[in-house]
Amino acid sequence: MLLRAASEMAPAGTTITIDSIEGIPVYNQDIEDAGIPSRVQQLKDRISASDGLLLVTPEYNNALPGPLKNAIDWLSRPPADIPKVFRNRPVGVIGASAGAVGTALAQVAWLPVFRTLGMAPYFGARVLVPRAKDAFDDSGRLEDETIRGQLQKFVHGFVEFVESCRK
């Protein structure tokens, strides 16, 4: 829901393409040795063709979520593909959580991953949605005006950052 809200707030002329990690298997060297799964390759190709990457993360047990980290691990395979998929790619991270703190710890936990992959993180704004079930209405629309303002500031700043990285 947060990613859909971000997409709706994108400046004119900007497209935020929504994708999912659904269908990505748990990383296993034996599977990799047999070939990169097609779903992983599809996502790698989409990221490689993009100008930037916006991750929307939940937070579980004060950390980044295992399934999303698993997807990033797959996307970095084989290691020779890291420059094409991640190197110098602008990346932003926002998140929503059921807890009272939002996703502050998950977002910080992503930084070593971004550093390892050689990405260019955006630090111009933060969006940490606490008590996510209360921030969205029954149709999935973000109705918390404070968070809407934070998200709009983030999205517009991230788009400017991505554009500056392309120069």
Image (cartoon, grey):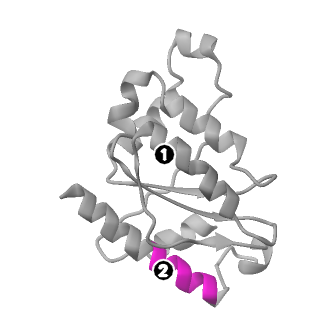
Q: Nearer the viewer, mark 1 or mark 2?
A: 1
Does the CB distance between marks 1 and 2 fall below 8 Å?
A: no
Residue ID at (76%, 70%): 101
Q: Position of residue 91 (x, y in %)?
A: 43, 54
On the image, numbered disc 2 is attached to which residue? 152
CA separation in Å, label 1 and label 2: 23 Å
Q: Position of residue 44 (x, y in %)?
A: 43, 36
Please name the predominant secondary structure of the magenta segment in the image.
helix
- Position of 163 with respect to 43 (left or right) is left
Crowd class of label 1 (few under 14; some 14 to 19; many from 20; radius 10 Å): many
Up the image or down, 88 lies above or below 24; here it is below
Up the image or down, 17 lies above or below 21; here it is below
Q: Secondary structure at mark 1?
A: helix
Asked if the magenta segment contains residue 149, the reply would be: yes
- Position of 164 with respect to 105 (left or right) is left
Residue 18's disc number: none
Q: Within the image, what quadrant is residue 34 found in?
A: top right
On the image, numbered disc 1 is attached to which residue? 114
* Three-letter code, disc 2: Gln
Which is more toward the observer, 154 or 46?
Answer: 154
Q: Which residues are magenta?
A: 146-154
Q: Within the image, what quadrant is residue 24 found in?
A: top right
* Three-letter code, disc 1: Phe
Quarter of the image for the C terminus: give it. Answer: bottom left
Which is more toward the observer, 133 or 116?
Answer: 116
